[in-house]
Amino acid sequence: MEAKAVAIAIVLLLLTFEEDGFGVSSYKVDWKEDSTPYRSPVSKAQTRHQHIKVQTGMLFLKKSLHVGTILPEGTMFARAGLPKPDSSVSTPLQPMYLATILSHFKIGRNSMKAKQVADTLRSCSKPSDMEEPQMCFSSRGEMAGFATKELGVRRARAAITTIHGHESPRSRYIVARITPVSTNMVACHPMDFPYEVYYCHRPKEVESFRVQLKEQENDMPLVTTTAMCHMNTFNWDKQYFELLGGERGEPICHYMPQNYIMFY
């Protein structure tokens, strides 16, 4: 069950976004590290592998997470076209309410958006796993409350991705600093929906890092993000290792794009 939950979470995080669908704490940055550049093994051409679809540069082996790593061309952390919150809607996130939601937001039944709404409702209606609790929220307050309870802390802290300045598809990111954060966390991913909905889960055997990225050419700070590394991948589909050129069981990481939240 745990491996299945991890796979679902990874797919939710890394899916590319269809053109006709729903398209979703910063601190002082100091760039002093100097290292021989290392290029990520996942090129732009490798971002689609059979049934796995990933955003360029988001998925990588942990052994490539070090200062000097150059992310693939086309890597972008912004998620375009995020739906805005709509606090006036209180429809439960259950498949039985699909028609009601489509009607309320005037979404065509056979459209890409309708398919995404249906997929989100199915994901959110699945029973929570005792080993890896999971739940969907349309309230950020409830989301933070869930994270605080699952982490067993007085108040959960949130880490988000911050883009400094303007992001461009032509930008080439290089890792400038890595800081360990926690091994106890709740990750929340925005879902494709007509208003703000997050899928939150508490993964096991995960390490997180705060990563600062700079522009390869002009050395300017571009992104402060979070990397989550799954340390036990022996039950993962072999396609992940074929995609990344790794061995079964070795740690696999993914960056948290803008608007994704990690509580710790």
Image (cartoon, rainbow, N blue to C red):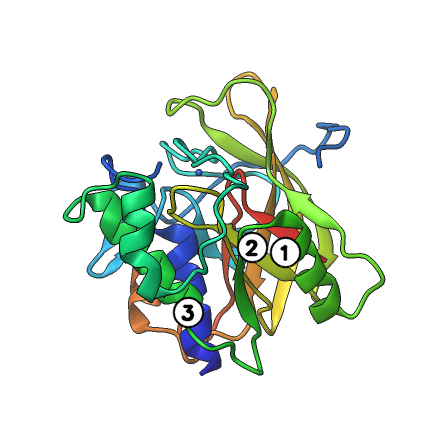
Three-letter code for the amino acid on which mark 3 is drawn: Ser
Q: Position of residue 192 (x, y in %)?
A: 37, 47
Q: Position of residue 78 (x, y in %)?
A: 46, 33
Q: What residue appears at the point 42 percent right and 73 percent down from the top-left corner?
A: 126
Secondary element under disc 3, as helix, strand or loop, is helix
Q: Residues within 10 Å of mark 1 (few under 14, many from 20)?
A: many
Left or right side of 138 for 13: left
Residue 263 seen in the figure: no
Residue 104 drawn above or below residue 95:
above
Secondary element under disc 2, as helix, strand or loop, is strand
Left or right side of 179 for 64: left
Q: Position of residue 60 (x, y in %)?
A: 45, 54
Q: Earlier in the sequence, mark 3 or mark 2?
A: 3
Pointer 2: what residue?
Answer: 188
Left or right side of 213 for 117: left
Pointer 3: what residue?
Answer: 125
Mark 1 and mark 2 residues within 8 Å of each other at the beta carbon: yes
Pointer 1: what residue?
Answer: 143
Q: In which quadrant is the C terminus drawn?
A: bottom right
Left or right side of 235 for 67: right
Q: What residue appears at the point 40 percent right and 76 percent down from the top-left corner?
A: 4
Q: Nearer the viewer, residue 196 or 161?
A: 196
- Residue 223 position by quadrant: top right
Q: What residue appears at the point 46 percent right and 77 percent down from the top-left corner?
A: 127
Q: What residue appears at the point 45 percent right and 28 percent down from the top-left corner?
A: 172
- Residue 20 position by quadrant: top left
Three-letter code for the amino acid on which mark 1 is drawn: Met
Q: Position of residue 170 (x, y in %)?
A: 38, 22
Residue 222 seen in the figure: yes
Q: Earlier in the sequence, mark 1 or mark 2?
A: 1
Tell me how far mark 3 sits from mark 1, CA to CA.
16 Å
